[in-house]
Amino acid sequence: MSTQTQPNVIYKDRLFKAIFGKQEHKDWLLSLYNALNNSDYKNPDDLELTTIGNIIYITMKNDLSFLIDS
């Protein structure tokens, strides 16, 4: 009989939000966005964090959201 370890998704979520979800780390979020989208945005002030705290949707949670370039 095999036992599988379940990942602690809450811990991973907190770490991701701590790294990328704060105003003072918008340059890190912009760097991540550029890497994932093959873009070249330069100004972190163009990012607007739009995360709504403690909101749970039917099948997902609003962990981190932002707007860039409108």
Image (cartoon, rainbow, N blue to C red):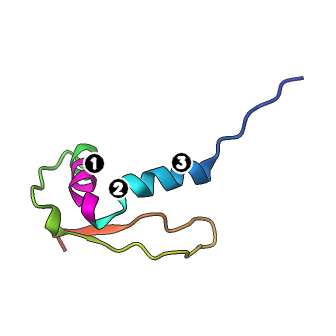
Which numbered dot is residue 32?
1
Q: CA distance from mark 1 to mark 3?
A: 17 Å
Dot 3 falls on a residue whose secondary structure is helix
Mark 2 residue crowding within 10 angstroms, few (<14) / some (14–19) / many (20+) = many
Asked whether 30 falls inside the magenta stretch, the response is yes
Asked whether 45 falls inside the magenta stretch, the response is no
| Earlier residue among tags 1 and 3 | 3
* Magenta stretch, main secondary structure class: helix
User: In the rendered view of the protein, which quadrant contains the N terminus?
Assistant: top right
User: In the rendered view of the protein, which quadrant contains the C terminus?
Assistant: bottom left
- Residue at 59% from the left image edge and 73% from the top image edge: 56
Q: CA distance from mark 2 to mark 3?
A: 12 Å
Q: CA distance from mark 1 to mark 2?
A: 9 Å
Q: Amino acid at mark 3?
A: Lys
- Residue at 76% from the left image edge and 31% from the top image edge: 4
Looking at the rendered image, the disc whose residue lies closer to the viewer, 1 or 3, is 3
Tally the marks. Answer: 3
Residue linked to disc 2 = 20
Residue linked to disc 3 = 12
Residue contact between numbered discs 1 and 2, judged by CB atoms under 8 Å? yes
Q: Position of residue 64 (x, y in %)?
A: 42, 64
Q: Is residue 63 above or below residue 31?
A: below
| Earlier residue among tags 2 and 3 | 3
Q: Nearer the viewer, residue 3 or 18?
A: 18
The magenta stretch is 24-31
Q: Nearer the viewer, residue 37 or 17?
A: 17
- Residue at 71% from the left image edge and 40% from the top image edge: 6
Mark 1 residue crowding within 10 angstroms, few (<14) / some (14–19) / many (20+) = few
Dot 1 falls on a residue whose secondary structure is helix
Q: Amino acid at mark 2?
A: Phe
Dot 2 falls on a residue whose secondary structure is helix
Q: Amino acid at mark 1?
A: Leu
